[in-house]
Amino acid sequence: MSTTTRTDSPRKRRSQVRAADLDQLNRRADGTRRPWYSTVIARVVMIVLSLVFLLPLYWMIISSLKSDEELAQFPPTFWPHSWQLGNFVDAVAAMPFLHFFANSTIITLSVVILSVLSNLVVAYGFACLRWPGRDVVFYVVIATLFLPFPVTLIPMFDMWARLGAVNTFVPLILPAMFGSAFYVFLLRQFLLQIPRDMLDAARIDGAREWTILWRLVFPTAKPALTTVAIFAAVASWNDFMGPLIYLQDESVQTLSIGLQSFRSVHAQDVSFNQLMAASFLVILPLLILFFVFQRYFIRGITIGGFK
């Protein structure tokens, strides 16, 4: 009997939390309850918008599974009559896909690791430490968001060219070590919610700032760090301009450049369904990444100040 009580109580608590959350969502800011049809309308609108956003992805997937004859049919079919999985094999064989995939993976993983570490340290300094001019420096960092990319393009390329870093991964990886204004802002908003008393108590006990950062702040900030990691991974994986400028040899190019070359160089030999198959293989890792870490991503966005 006691075992049943222990196993059922967490479920009851979770159901009570869900019921309380739903009740809170169904109430206005003044505490009055919303009419039932407002929730229904909101969910119908969200479902319709979700389907609209998913339509291009769905069309890309079914196009990659169709044959050339079925693609030429009019009106078009909304489901393949026979799945042509060989389109994926032909798309991979038409270009050095695995080599481009390895290059993109190396760059993306390096950028994610450096972005998480560097932005956490900078955000900790802005959120958890007190020093003169902290807010002024933070505003200056945020102001860098307004610098357009073309303004820094030529100076950055000239700097990396003088350093001999063109045709290497360095210009695409090393800037992540110095943080990003948006990621710093996101993490700072999250870290500001950590109780100051807990950090002060650790300092009184003799803990150094690095100890507090890695043993107290880092475990607490995992949702926000996951959000930063996903943002950094998506930006690095989909980056086209950076590899186009710095990676001129085919041996160091990424999937974004390889897909463009695949479309232009092999335009006469590759059919539309193979192009869609290659495009789907490029975005597949991002889809898996988002669905695996979706819960942490949404939590980090919500708690981090983007409610």
Image: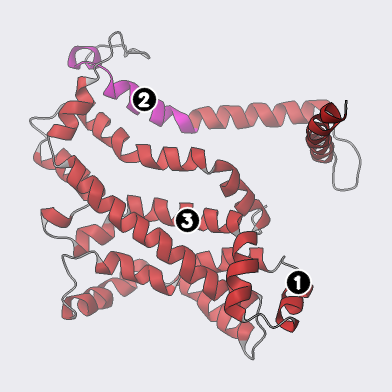
> Residue 32: x, y in percent?
91, 40
* Magenta-tinted stretch: 53-71
Using a 10 Å C-alpha cutoff, classify the residue at mark 2 as few (fewer than 14 neighbours), some (14 to 19) or many (20 or more): few
Q: Which residue is mark 1?
A: 198
Image quadrant containing the N terminus: top right
- Amino acid carrying label 3: it is Ala
**Are circles 2 and 3 on residues that touch, CB within 8 Å?**
no
Q: Is residue 173 magenta?
A: no
C-alpha span from label 1 to label 3:
26 Å
**Are circles 2 and 1 on residues that touch, CB within 8 Å?**
no
The mark lying in front, picked from 2 and 3, is 3
The mark lying in front, picked from 2 and 1, is 1
- Amino acid carrying label 2: it is Trp
- Amino acid carrying label 1: it is Met
C-alpha span from label 2 to label 1:
52 Å
Colour style of the rendered protein structure: secondary structure
**Are circles 1 and 3 on residues that touch, CB within 8 Å?**
no
> Residue 12: x, y in percent?
83, 32
Q: Which residue is mark 2?
A: 59
Query: Which label's residue is closer to the chain start, 2 or 3?
Result: 2
- Residue 229, numbered circle: 3
C-alpha span from label 2 to label 3:
29 Å
Q: Is residue 70 above or below residue 57?
A: above
In the image, 191: left or right of 155? right
- Furthest residue in direction bottom, as rendered: 132
Using a 10 Å C-alpha cutoff, classify the residue at mark 3 as few (fewer than 14 neighbours), some (14 to 19) or many (20 or more): many
Q: Is residue 55 magenta?
A: yes
Residue drawn at point x = 29 percent, y = 55 percent = 106
